[in-house]
Image (cartoon, rainbow, N blue to C red):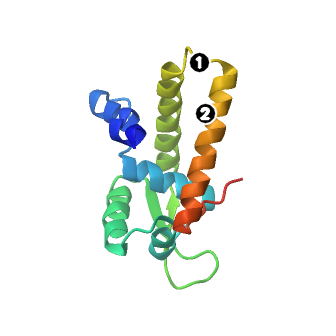
Amino acid sequence: MLLSRHGYLFGSRARSDRWHLDRSAYILLSRIQMDGPMSIGQLSDAFGLDASTLNRQTAAMLRAGLVERIPDPDGGIARKFRVTEEGAKSLDGDRGLNIEVIGGLMEEWSAQEIAEFASSLQRLNRAIERLEGRPWPRP
């Protein structure tokens, strides 16, 4: 709760022009980049969000040129969202900044402490996903 409450990573966005994406765009783009093109229905299932919320968020990402709508590569009826080159560039840039900020926060931590934290955080995330019934497939 404190991690998300502090919102350090996303709060620092307001203090810097180096960031490109808001929190929802960062999360949605990350998922689409990892899983490939996704429809509103698939995003709704993945995140447990209402379709109207996702319509607003994806419309903003379309206007910003971060995603594009494409026909379903598998031949389905629903159109899907695919990350554009600009979206990937923005996502990669913000991901790099996130890593930079976290690196600064953990600069006095030992390699073992960082590894233990990463392992515990991964375990916590997977437990939450399991509880919600929304596992996030990872490579």
Q: Quadrant of the N terminus?
A: top left
Is residue 39 in view?
A: no
Query: Which residue is nearer to you in this view: 109 or 37?
Result: 109
Give x and y (percent) for residue 122: 62, 45
Residue 64 drawn at (x, y percent): 35, 52
- Mark 1 touches mark 2? (CB < 8 Å): yes
Q: Nearer the viewer, residue 52 or 116?
A: 116
Q: Secondary structure at mark 2?
A: helix
Residue in view at x 49 percent, y 43 percent: 91
Q: Is residue 96 above or below residue 78?
A: above
Question: Is 96 drawn above or below residue 48 in the view shown?
Answer: above
Q: Give the quadrant of residue 112.
A: top right
Question: In this orientation, does residue 8 appear?
Answer: yes
Report the side of 5 relative to 131 (left or right): left
Question: Residue 59, position in %: x, y?
Answer: 33, 64
Going by the numbered disc 1, the residue's amino acid type is Trp
Q: Which residue is mark 1?
A: 109
- The residue at the point 58 percent across, 42 percent down is 121
Image mark count = 2
Q: What residue does disc 2 label?
A: 117
Q: Amino acid at mark 2?
A: Phe
- Tell me: residue 68, above or below residue 110: below
Task: Name the residue rendered at 62%, 74% in the picture.
Answer: 73
Whole-number angstrom distance, CA of label 1 to CA of label 2: 10 Å
